[in-house]
Amino acid sequence: MEYAIITKDLTKYYGDFLAVDRVNLRVPFNTIYGFLGPNGAGKTTTIRMMCGLTNISSGDAIVNGHSVRKEPEKVKASVGVVQDISNLYPELTCFDNLMFSAEMHGVPKRLRKERVLELLEFFDLEDKKDEKFANLFRGLKRRLTIAAALVHKPKILLLDEPTLVLDVKSRRKMWALIKALKEEDITIFLTSHNVYEVSHLSERVAVINKGRIVAEGKPSELKRLVPYDETIELGVSDPKRLLERLKGVDVIDRAYLDKGTLKVVARDSLVAIEEISQVLREEGIDVNFMSLRSADMEEVFLKIVEGEGVGRFKQGDLHSQEGH
Ligand SMILES: Nc1ncnc2c1ncn2[C@@H]1O[C@H](COP(=O)(O)OP(=O)(O)OP(=O)(O)O)[C@@H](O)[C@H]1O
């Protein structure tokens, strides 16, 4: 099988500090590949090495068939990269930002406008064309930043924490866009520290902790290891009444009371929140708090390290892929 990205003992030292330790990954073409890890695990550093934004200390990455060490220019032409901080200009309009990005990426002048309009349409930003980047809401800013990384039609998109600090709705919109990009034959390598997000979006997942890959496999294998469902947590004036009313709601899988807090697990949390809000209004129940949480990374690592029900989802599985 041909791979979009192969890393071979990819390693990074910052001075004496080992930030990424012999990482070996294989990302097939036309997949969404999730790279999961807590803060400081080495996700950003790995992405930056993959596209030549930071030097590799040892090992190499082969991206779209090109070695980052030997052919960095070919790698740069093959990838779009979106880091957590946007590189766009606040005072420029969306259109001008994309035009400038097209120029920077070497898109021939005669093709730029057409490409930019195409991207504005794809990212549902046509009505923001003449709006300054600074005036956009966060979710739209993130969308435009991704659009800017795609001006040169790269085959591979590296996305660093694409939904960090987005609200629930913007996050869902971003997920839909990421899936739509895959349909355009773009391979997506995305980092996240959100277990639910990575499991929901990706076809394969690698887990990194303290610079080392601790597990690799399919999300279903990860799910066996850690229950990563999102839970809606509610503090309300009449939890029993609310619980009773939620029993017949189709999208809700489980609802239960835990020390006075109502916990709800649903197939689609966003739809469930809308349904719950409706019931709250109808019943005149007051809300003290409502939050959404998924399994945190600490739980994930404890389970992986303890080897609880690890099954095939292990570092070893990574090597067994090579035979296929
Ligand atoms: N320029 C640098 N100089 C020294 N140490 C660095 C540098 N950049 C990152 N590090 C360290 O390397 C480790 C990995 O950082 P990295 O940013 O790659 O992690 P991450 O998984 O992306 O985390 P986050 O989600 O917090 O960005 C961290 O311990 C970080 O403090």
Image (spheres, rainbow, N blue to C red):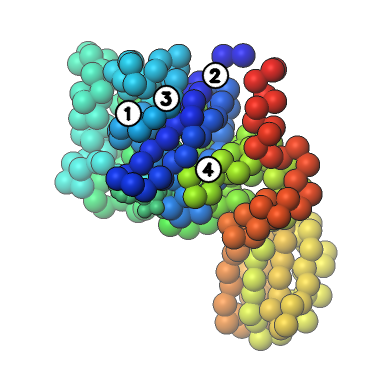
Label drawn at residue 212: 4
Farthest left residue? Answer: 91
Q: Residue furthest bottom?
A: 237
Q: Quadrant of residue 290?
A: bottom right
Tell me which label, 3 or 4, sits earlier in the chain.
Answer: 3
For label 2, the SS is strand
Which amino acid type is marked by label 1? Gly
For residue 59, side relative to residue 295 (left or right): left
- State the CA–CA distance, disc 1 to disc 3: 11 Å
Residue type for callout 2: Tyr
Say which label, 1 or 3, has the lower sequence index: 1
Measured as percent of width and height from the top left, residue 295 is found at 64, 59
Query: Which residue is tagged 1?
Result: 52
Q: Amino acid at mark 3?
A: Asp
Label 4 SS: strand
Mark 4: amino acid: Arg
**Residue at the spot of label 3:** 60
